[in-house]
Amino acid sequence: MKKFISQEIESYALSKSNRPSALCAQLAGHTVETKEMSVMLIGEMEASFLGFLINSISAKRVLEFGTFTGYSALAMAEQLPADGEVVTMDLDQQLEATHKEFWNKSPHGAKIKCLFGPALETVMKTEGLFDLVFIDADKTNYLNYLKISLEKLAPGGIIALDNVLWSGEVLKSASELDPEKDSSTLSIQEVNDWVRDQEGLYGTLVPIRDGIFVITKKG
């Protein structure tokens, strides 16, 4: 993953920011040590930013597309009130042991509910509306995830899409991209353009880590 902000600046920013717990740091370390695709883990600065979003709207319910090892779910759960809930979805049930190992150590772990299966099917099993939706799953379905998230979004809620800069690949023109090899890049470009063109949405693409598109409904 390409870094858009120097390590020195990011470290300084983190030193002035609220950060996830020591348990989250342990989970991040465990992920890096044991998982081949540890690059999928969100960064500490991004976790802090998600915590800010939760606190800024007094969120109680969070929906997450893409659990991975459960770091982001735990970081968000830590910022919710005692009766808050994170509903997180993932395709890979083999990660459940890692989730439980760390979530069970946290007083906030009981706030997290993990659903396994294809997200577009699994999300239909969720009830009610959500104050924050965090999308960090397969990129080729990003627009589908966003559209269904808008239906599940509570009034005043926020959607955050991760990896929307895609290591800078989004800067490439259509002629530079192969429809098969670069399907994720093309899908992210599509969703970024779609958000920009929606009159009823207000979005800001924030260049934290690999880019987060923060979206809310106008009015």
Image (cartoon, rainbow, N blue to C red):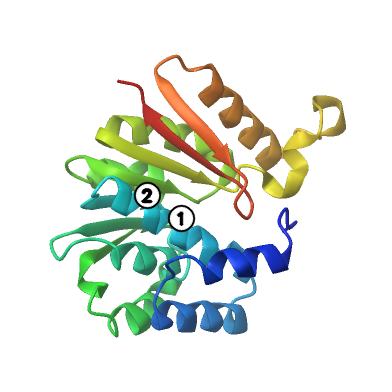
* In this view, 124 is above or below 87: above
Amino acid type assigned to the residue bearing label 2 in the image? Leu
Query: Residue 166 in the image: x percent, y percent?
Result: 68, 46
Residue 81 relative to residue 157: left or right: left
Rendered residue at 58%/83% (across/down): 34
Residue 39, image quadrant: bottom right
Q: Are marks 2 and 1 in contact (CB under 8 Å)?
A: yes
> Which residue is identified by label 1?
49
| Above or below for 149 versus 43 | above
Can residue 162 be seen here?
yes
At label 1, which amino acid type do we have?
Phe
Q: Which disc is residue 129 wearing? A: none
User: Where in the figure is residue 91, as x and y percent of width and height?
Assistant: 44, 58
What distance separates the C-alpha of mark 2 from that of mark 1? 6 Å
Give the vertical position of 38 relative to 200 (above or below).
below
Quadrant occupied by the N terminus: bottom right
Residue closer to the observer: 50 or 138: 50
| Label 1 packing within 10 angstroms: few (<14), some (14-19), many (20+) | some
Q: Residue at x 39, y 17 (%)?
A: 200
Which residue is under mark 2?
A: 53
Depth check: 107 or 148 in front?
107
Report the side of 98 relative to 153 (left or right). right
Within 10 Å of the Cα at label 2, are there few (<14), some (14-19), or many (20+) other Cα atoms? many
Which residue extends farthest right? 176
Which image quarter: residue 8? bottom right
The quadrant in which the C terminus is found is: top left
**Of 133 and 44, which appears nearest the observer?**
44
Expressed as whole percent of the image width and height from the top left, the position of residue 85 reads 21, 58
Q: Secondary structure at mark 2?
A: helix
